[in-house]
Amino acid sequence: MNRQDNLVNRILELVGEQLPEGVAALGQDLRHNLAAAVKESLVKMDLVTREEFEIQTRVLARTRQRLEKLEHQLLEMEHNLAQGKRAE
């Protein structure tokens, strides 16, 4: 069973707990229809897995480090350029 199925099952449990007794007695058909609706909603949300999120977080951190390094290099170059102009 994958994560999405686990999430769907948990949502169905929570919804089932809130339904009036008569409605909950409709049973499997209601559960099947609710499961389909929940899965469709999750697909529309365009969610990512925790693993994908963590990968992108690491990529962003590396990109931020590279950007900071480039900013530092640019400041050094600007400083050196300004020092060179003053010497002339």
Image: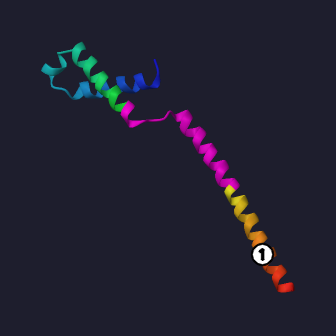
Residue 40: give x, y in percent of width and height.
33, 28
Query: In which quadrant is the C terminus drawn?
Result: bottom right
Q: Is residue 71 left or right of residue 30?
A: right
Q: Is residue 62 left or right of residue 84?
A: left
Residue 46: give x, y in percent of width and height.
42, 36
* Residue at image coords 38%, 36%: 45
* Residue at image coords 73%, 66%: 74
Residue type indicated by callout 1: His
* Looking at the image, residue 61 lies above or below residue 69: above
* Looking at the image, residue 28 lies above or below residue 67: above
**58 in magenta:** yes
Residue 25: give x, y in percent of width and height.
17, 16
Looking at the picture, tell me which residue is in the foreground, 54 or 79: 79
Q: Is residue 45 left or right of residue 49?
A: left
Q: Is residue 57 left or right of residue 38?
A: right
* Looking at the image, residue 30 lies above or below residue 45: above
Name the residue beneath numbered marker 1: 79
**Mark 1 crowdedness (10 Å alpha carbons): few <14, some 14-19, many ≥20:** few
**3 in magenta:** no
> Could you say which quadrant of the image residue 17 lies in?
top left
* Residue at image coords 44%, 35%: 47
* Looking at the image, residue 25 lies above or below residue 81: above
Q: What stretch is highlighted in magenta?
A: 43-66
Q: How is the image coloured?
A: rainbow
Return the residue found at the far left: 22
Total count of labels: 1
**What secondary structure is the magenta-colored segment mainly?**
helix
Q: Is mark 1 on a helix, strand or loop?
A: helix
